[in-house]
């Protein structure tokens, strides 16, 4: 049985018909693709026990303003969705329990290494993803000495030719050339990828990256094969969950 999206009006109706503690105690994964601030706030307030949160760029919520009753472990959002209009601050207590973090967009200002170095201080963060290859520059500064990070994924939403060492040369990060934790990945439907992972506990891009890194370390895959699209193309198409699987991985 595949998961499905619940319309906000249906979810709000269910929230209003149940005891206050039901959704808090039952919901651990929440994806919000919504645009009505009051309704978003009501949903999140009812589901305050969530541990895995996906906020689409269309939502008006700000993660740092949410009251969580359990430590937040996984977060997928853009920078505005995390921090609002405030300064980027990865030392905020809400982020301290994160193990997995995906950031959708680039900052509005130039990278300040002092701000982004604070990511390395998140005590439980082991998996980090950026949905823009321009983050490779900052990754070149952070990753070599970041021993606790196990997986770093750069996501591409369409095929842009070879995802290989030439990408690292373009961004002047030769220090990442022999970095086994780095994975470059095509993921046209990140929303459905998240749903698949939340539904099954595996099968999302995190688990695919982990498998690829393990195979690199064991010698099953070339050490400099960063591109999962090329190495696992047929398996990704077969195993990915999305409404239209056959169109997920189309090359131009």
Image (tube, rainbow, N blue to C red):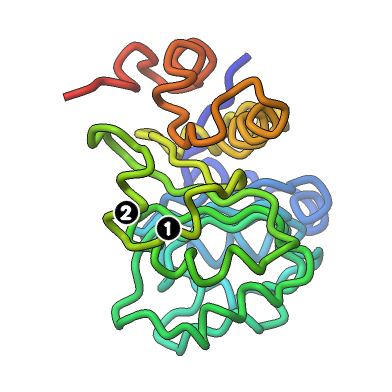
Residue in view at x 49 percent, y 64 percent = 139
Residue in view at x 61 percent, y 74 percent = 119
In the rendered image, residue 60, in percent from the top left (x then y), is placed at 41, 68
For the C terminus, the quadrant is top left
Marks 1 and 2, how far apart at CA: 6 Å
Q: Is residue 184 visible?
A: yes
Residue in view at x 72 percent, y 27 percent = 218
Of residues 179 and 127, which is closer to you in this image? 179
Query: Up-down: is 90 above or below 178?
Result: below
Pointer 1 residue? 174
For the N terminus, the quadrant is top right
Of residues 242 and 153, which is closer to you in this image? 153
Query: Up-down: is 146 above or below 151?
Result: below
Query: Up-down: is 127 above or below 141?
Result: above
In the rendered image, residue 222, in percent from the top left (x then y), is placed at 54, 27
> Which of the two labelled residues, at mark 1 and mark 2, occupies the earlier sequence position?
2
Q: Is residue 12 visible?
A: no
Pointer 2 residue? 169
Of residues 33 and 191, which is closer to you in this image? 191
237 lies left or right of 178: left
Of residues 18 and 182, which is closer to you in this image? 182
Return the mark for residue 34. none
Question: CB of mark 1 within 8 Å of CB of mark 2?
Answer: yes
In the rendered image, residue 248, in percent from the top left (x then y), is placed at 34, 22
Disc 1 element: helix
In the rendered image, residue 6, in percent from the top left (x then y), is placed at 52, 37
Mark 2, residues whose alpha carbon is within 10 Å: few (<14), some, or many (≥20)? Answer: few
Residue in view at x 48 percent, y 61 percent = 39
Disc 2 element: helix
Residue 198 quadrant: top right
Residue 202 quadrant: top right
């Amino acid at each position: 049985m595949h998961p499905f999206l619940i319309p906000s009006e249906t979810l709000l109706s269910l929230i209003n018909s149940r005891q206050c503690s039901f959704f808090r105690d039952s919901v651990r994964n929440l994806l919000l693709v919504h645009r009505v601030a009051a309704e978003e706030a009501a949903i999140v307030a009812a589901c305050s026990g969530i541990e895995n949160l996906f906020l689409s760029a269309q939502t008006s919520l700000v993660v740092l303003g949410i009251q969580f009753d359990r430590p937040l472990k996984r977060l997928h959002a853009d920078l505005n969705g995390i921090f609002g209009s405030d300064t980027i601050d990865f030392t905020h207590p809400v982020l301290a329990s994160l193990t997995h973090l995906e950031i959708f967009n680039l900052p509005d200002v130039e990278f300040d290494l002092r701000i982004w170095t604070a990511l390395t201080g998140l005590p439980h963060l082991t998996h980090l993803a950026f949905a823009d290859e321009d983050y490779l520059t900052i990754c070149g500064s952070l990753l070599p000495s970041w021993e606790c990070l196990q997986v770093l994924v750069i996501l591409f939403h369409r095929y842009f030719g070879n995802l290989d060492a030439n990408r690292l040369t373009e961004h002047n990060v030769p220090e990442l050339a022999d970095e086994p934790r780095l994975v470059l990945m095509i993921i046209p439907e990140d929303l459905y990828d998240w749903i698949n992972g939340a539904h099954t506990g595996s099968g999302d891009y995190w688990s695919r990256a982990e498998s690829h890194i393990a195979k690199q370390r064991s010698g099953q895959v070339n050490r400099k094969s960063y591109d999962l699209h090329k190495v696992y193309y047929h398996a990704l198409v077969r195993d990915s969950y999305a409404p239209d699987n056959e169109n997920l991985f189309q090359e131009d």
